[in-house]
Image: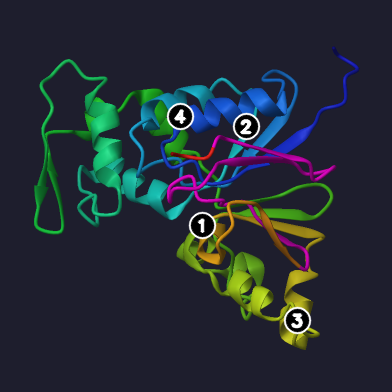
Amino acid sequence: MENQKRKTFVMGDIHGDNIALEQCLQRSGIDYENDQLIQLGDVVDRNDGVYECVEQLLKIKHLIAIKGNHDNWLLDFIETDYHPISWAHGGNNTIISYLNHTDKKGVCIPRGNGYKTSLNSSDIPASHQEFFRNQELYYIDEENRCFVHAGFNRYIGFEQQKESSYYWDRDLWTDALSSLEEKPPKEIYETITVFKEIYIGHTPTTAWETDKPMNAFNIYNLDTGAGNGGRLTIMDIDTKEYWQSDKKA
């Protein structure tokens, strides 16, 4: 086992779907002790298995967890007991997931455009709090492959971005995709070739009527809609072989 070559896998947005997570981990054959998993963010919201998803990810020894915008909202709650958008974007399922693992009688009720809840930040286990505090904005490996939740502003140096750009900016992907039919404008080409490859989530491929990974130039989109009625995807970054969860009924 000591001489076994470590594989590196990348996984798209999970959005609390613990069954899909288990299926992808099992089908890929990932070695929890030896292989590396780079998870592209948005572990939380939209499905009610958030607690179980974090527990499963924490078992992977060589895990690199990237911060997604939904994760950042939960981190705000962990740090302040205040959720900046009142859990409005599928956050009720995150509430339910953590309330199911408390001893108190939990409350999660609609209120305006969001939710009112009895969940406190102290109800979230310390190991989970640390998981969200320790998520990375991006990761660049030894082969100059970039892993980031959403993308980045290509008109600004990569390390000079606003923090939110890494988990919000979709322009890198949408501009590259719109240029596939023709030679890309010079500024797009120069930006994307700064890295050997770029792996993103955040923008579901289901918007293009597919639940498979998409590729535009050297950019790979791994958000195949686990939070939007699609599938969860895990890919071997060296072979580009990928495995997916079952399609939801």
Q: Nearer the viewer, residue 203 or 168?
A: 203
Q: Secondary structure at mark 2?
A: strand
Q: How is the image coloured?
A: rainbow
Q: In the image, residue 108 lies at what x, y percent?
A: 14, 37
Q: Amino acid at mark 4?
A: Asn
Question: Is residue 16 shown above or below 70?
Answer: above
- Separation of marks 2 and 4 at Cα, in angstroms: 17 Å
Q: Which residue is mark 2?
A: 63
Q: Please tell me which residue is depicted at 57% across the width and 54% down the height of the picture.
A: 201
Q: Which residues are magenta?
A: 217-246
Task: Choose the circle earlier in sequence order: 4 or 3.
Answer: 4
Q: Of the numbered discs in the image, which one, if any, rests on residue 18?
A: 4
Task: Choose the circle earlier in sequence order: 4 or 1.
Answer: 4
- Separation of marks 4 and 1 at Cα, in angstroms: 18 Å
Q: Which residue is mark 1?
A: 202
Quadrant of image for the C terminus: top left
- Separation of marks 1 and 3 at Cα, in angstroms: 23 Å
What is the crowding at mark 2: few (fewer than 14 residues within 10 Å), some, or many (at least 20)?
some
